[in-house]
Image (cartoon, grey):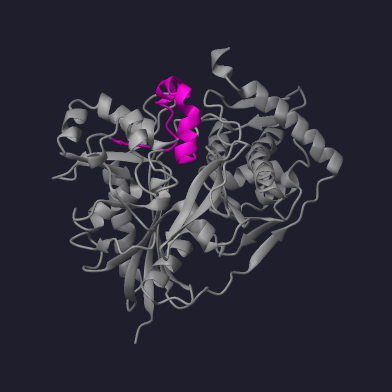
Amino acid sequence: MPRPAILAVDQGTTNTKALLFAADSGAVLGRAAHPLGVRHPRPGWAEQSGEAIWGSVAGAIAELIATTPGCDVAAIAIANQRETILLWDAETGEPLAPAISWQCRRTSERCAALRPHAARIVARTGLGIDPLFPSTKLGWLLDEVPGARARAEAGELRAGTVDSWLLWHLTGGAVHATDVSNASRTQLLSLDTGDWDEEMLALFGIPRSLLPQVRSSDARFGTTSGAGAPEGLPIHAMLGDSHAALLGHGFAGPGEAKVTCGTGSSLMAVTDGRVASAHGLSGTIAWGRGGAVVHALEGNVAVSGHAAAFATRLLNLKDEQALTALAASVPASEGVVFVPALAGLGAPHWESDARGLLSGMSLGTEPAHVARAVLEGIALQIGDVAMAMDADLGAPLASLSVDGGAAGNDLLMQMLADAIGRPVLRPRQLELGARGVAWLAAEAAGLAPARWPPIEQDRFEPRADPADRAALHARWRAAVGASAGLHER
């Protein structure tokens, strides 16, 4: 008799993965992946085709099912890129416009106009004012797409983050819902009630009827219907990808932290109840599980792995492996510093007008020094968030666990350990988001043990001389300061 399996979808910015996990052990039984593009129609803008997002999911599921025969798929689970927002027709499911990506900065002026309300927004939602969050992006869609606001107020439209969009398609349009982790990233959810905040809806001009129902992350969200997936499968869990990765590491207690290194980075730690950050981090909801809501602190970096892709193109290299090899060919960056503020600076700086900066070059600078500085810049950004997390939690993190595609880069992980002065722990399975949401679905379906067996880890110990680390941080802080508002100078 086939073992029950969970089909986990991990829908990311540039890639959609579908994996099958054995429900009783977490063993990976199969995987498939489909790439996805991001468009940049104007400077600072980033958008994706809603149809392409769904198509990548349907394609990955179909390929996975075709290549892993004989599995008893007991449930589907969804982990997704967060803060990307879509607007679609309630009857036809047709998007009214491209999905506005979490990377998009088109609402910077709207955010600036909201500064007088900043304290109230943070108090209610845990999130500072920044174009990252969907609140202003959804308002932009309603105002800029012809007829959208009137149609929304008439109940003809639906809006949601990527999880809602996928759920809509998987259920044949029968269910419009989201989970509390994704909802907590919209800047429209009250962290105290776990439901849409009427004051925030009024402030941002969002009709409540437009939004999905908020449910616990381990809810039974519906069943598949005419969606290309096997018919009648229960959809048993949904989580934002970073939240899912935290659960995938097995972290459920206060102070346990991980950083997901993907297109951007997210450092997240479970907290004992709601914690207000005094150091530039965001309050968020990690997940809803078993009738309880678990809170977390998070620091978001807008551009991490994407900086390596950017530098690979800029240096005319074959691929990111070539960038890493070039960076490893020199022992130091020789004073060169790269600030990867290619979409502003996120936590803990929150400088939306910052721009990427390459500084400290001399006549002796070689491409290898630039390549090394790019990877160091990725590590140092994450290091800034780790230090802010230390301060907010009142104690230093003993170590930092990592996951995500960029975590597979050994040189980058060593640089991260050197930047934070603590061990970096990397599980030998990096698809922790899919693993986390799959385990949650298996638990919700009554198929999983209390914990799946732990994954073996690689350990990166800090090796940098303390004086060298201090000098690097000093150069980094100076460069970050120079990058803020650079485009206006």
Residue 449 drawn above or below residue 242: below
Residue situated in front as seen by the camera: 484 or 199: 199
Q: Give the residue at x 40% y 48%.
A: 193
Left/right of residue 16 with respect to residue 225 in the rendered view = right
Residue situated furthest bottom in the rendering: 1
Left/right of residue 420 with respect to residue 189 in the rendered view = right
Residue situated in front as seen by the camera: 304 or 351: 351
Left/right of residue 66 with respect to residue 96 in the rendered view = right
Q: Report x, y in % for residue 111.
A: 44, 25
Q: Which residues are magenta?
A: 98-127
For the N terminus, give its image quadrant.
bottom left
Residue 97 drawn above or below residue 144: below
Q: Give the residue at x 16% y 33%.
A: 151
Q: Quadrant of residue 171?
A: bottom left
Left/right of residue 234 with respect to residue 251 in the rendered view = left
Numbered marks: total = 0
Residue 9 in view of the camera: yes
For the C terminus, give its image quadrant.
top right
Q: Report x, y in % for residue 145.
A: 23, 27
Q: Report x, y in % for residue 320.
A: 57, 44
Q: Report x, y in % for residue 146.
A: 20, 25
Is 258 colored magenta in this rendering?
no
Is 104 colored magenta in this rendering?
yes
Q: Give the residue at x 35% y 69%.
A: 67
Residue situated furthest top in the rendering: 489
Residue 43 drawn above or below residue 168: above
Residue 80 in view of the camera: no
